[in-house]
Amino acid sequence: MIELRRITQGTDRELQTLLSLYREAFPQEERREEGQLLRLVEEKKEMVFNAVKADGDLAGLFVYWEFEEFYYLEHLAVCPELRNRKIGQQVLDYADRALKGCRILEVEPPLTEIAARRIAYYRRNGYEVVEKTYEQPSYDGLKNGIPLWIMSNYREMNPAEAIDTIQKEVYRNNY
């Protein structure tokens, strides 16, 4: 069974441990600089940075943003030694129960086997591709954007407003 604990202080001991997982799990262009991330953890109430615990042990991280109309699921990573134990599945089950309404996430297009498997995984969990021409802005405003797809648990949604909010509130306002 998992437990999520919100981290709100940059000096949190578990956050310091999770930073290495964050660096390992996401390529540089798909993550924030450490100083920016620590500032957001402390200052942005919309951003929820969770330590994921499984049977009392630190097992991963789950970061999402709360907006009026939807939730943006930004990062989910499980510690390598604890993978294949359905921890990520339990986090998505938590999101399904606790984050009522529209949930949105970004995925890489299925250009590799792992990317295709990730899309299939999210589909099995009730998400569908709603936008294929999205470009994720860089986290620092200096690098090129990354072509990604948007998936949502609301199949009939028009993603334009949500994308505008994500690009403004998650990326551009936080350089």
Image: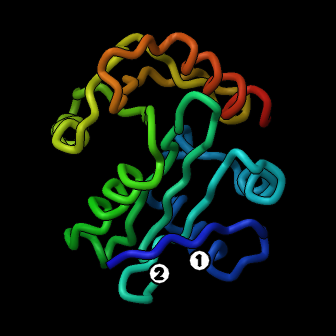
Q: Dot 1, how many residues are within 10 Å of its Cα: few (below 14), some (14-19), or many (20+)?
A: few
Left or right: where 38 falls relative to 106: right
Sequence-wise, the earlier of marks 2 and 1 is: 1
Left or right: where 10 falls relative to 60: right
Q: Quadrant of the N terminus?
A: bottom left
The correct choice, above or below, for 7 with respect to 92 in the image is below
Give the x, y percent position of residue 42. Answer: 81, 59
Query: Which one is in front, 31 or 103?
Result: 103
Do the CB atoms of the residues marked 2 and 1 lie less than 8 Å apart?
Answer: yes
Q: Quadrant of the C terminus?
A: top right
Marking on residue 86: none
The residue where tag 2 is placed is: 58
Q: Dot 2, how many residues are within 10 Å of its Cα: few (below 14), some (14-19), or many (20+)?
A: some
Give the x, y percent position of residue 156. Answer: 33, 15
* Residue for point 45% across, 43% down: 100
* Residue for point 67% across, 34% down: 170
- Report how many numbered discs are placed on residues in the image: 2
The residue where tag 1 is placed is: 17
Query: Which one is in front, 169 or 100?
Result: 100
Corner quadrant of residue 151 = top left
Q: Secondary structure at mark 2?
A: strand
Cα–Cα span, label 2 and label 1: 9 Å
Which is in the foreground here, disc 2 or disc 1?
A: 2
Give the x, y percent position of residue 72. Answer: 52, 37
Dot 2 amino acid type: Leu
Left or right: where 158 falls relative to 119: right
* Residue for point 36% across, 33% down: 107
Corner quadrant of residue 163 = top right
Give the x, y percent position of residue 166. Answer: 61, 27
The correct choice, above or below, for 130 with respect to 28 in the image is above
Query: Which one is in front, 5 or 116?
Result: 5
Dot 1 amino acid type: Thr
